[in-house]
Amino acid sequence: MATWKIEDDCLAPGNKYRVDYIGPNPFRIANAIKGILRRVMEVETKDVWERDFRWDNTGDPRGFFNRWYVLKPRDLYSKVFLEVTLQGLQPSDPNKDGKLVMLIGGRVRTDFNLNSAFKKSPLYSGRTNLGGLGEIGGLLWFWNRIFYNDIRRQHIRWCNSKVDLVWRELRGMLKMPVPERTI
């Protein structure tokens, strides 16, 4: 099925927050992340999943890699997609210092399904090439630009605030200073 997709990073012009941590028991974040993401993003358990988990127990400290995703629908067309990546070293003694690098980011994705003959037409989708002049806008582009653009901007601001809140909670859990919010 043909789809017109629009995707924006919530933290543009950057795309992720980065946290570097050296201290005791960095793996505790991996154990708590699902609950934090569920609570902050206001979703059910089914909307939070662990995409990747790797644990190397061949040495000490033990390496780990963990990637979590959250999907939060915002309306009929848009959804927020949040990603948290954890990579670190966990000593066998949790009181010894380990290392952790966290990346936290999010995107707002808007999909308009072009699932009928009319929606695929140049009048609606704007997919017409006028002799090398490029594509022109159709009714969908016009509707998005005039009516839906402000709603998408609200979704991006909401996503930005949720990514910031996850970042703050994880830093607080690691007992790292949390700067005042500047936005």
Image: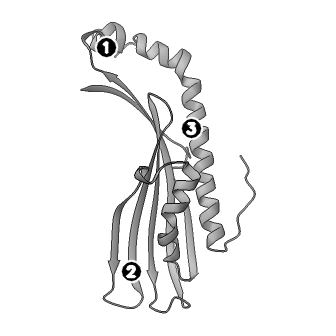
Under circle 2, the secondary element is: strand
Q: Position of residue 88 (x, y in %)?
A: 45, 76
In the rendered structure, which amino acid carries the disc numbered 1?
Lys
Query: Which one is earlier in the sequence, the residue at label 2 or at label 3?
Result: 2
Q: In this view, which residue lies farthest toward the top?
A: 123
Q: Position of residue 180 (x, y in %)?
A: 75, 57
- Look at 44% across and 81% down and name the residue there: 89
Q: Which residue is mark 2?
A: 63
Q: Where residue 72 is drawn, which disc sits there? A: none
Disc 3 crowd, CA 10 A, few/some/many (<14, 14-19, 20+): many
Under circle 1, the secondary element is: helix
Whether residue 74 is visible to the viewer of this picture, yes or no, is yes
Q: Position of residue 158 (x, y in %)?
A: 60, 40
Query: Which one is earlier in the sequence, the residue at label 2 or at label 1?
Result: 2
The residues bearing labels 2 and 3 have C-alpha atoms spaced at a distance of 34 Å
The residues bearing labels 2 and 1 have C-alpha atoms spaced at a distance of 50 Å
Q: Which residue is mark 1?
A: 119
Residue 86 vertical placement versus 14 (above, below): below
- Look at 55% across and 15% down and name the residue there: 146
In depth, the one of 125 and 53 nearer the eye is: 53
Disc 1 crowd, CA 10 A, few/some/many (<14, 14-19, 20+): some
Q: Position of residue 70 (x, y in %)?
A: 45, 51
Q: Where residue 156 is drawn, which disc sits there? A: 3
- Look at 52% across and 68% down and name the residue there: 32
Disc 2 crowd, CA 10 A, few/some/many (<14, 14-19, 20+): many
Under circle 3, the secondary element is: helix
In the rendered structure, which amino acid carries the disc numbered 3?
Ile
- Look at 44% across and 16% down and name the residue there: 141
Query: Which one is earlier in the sequence, the residue at label 1 or at label 3?
Result: 1
Q: Quadrant of the N terminus?
A: top left
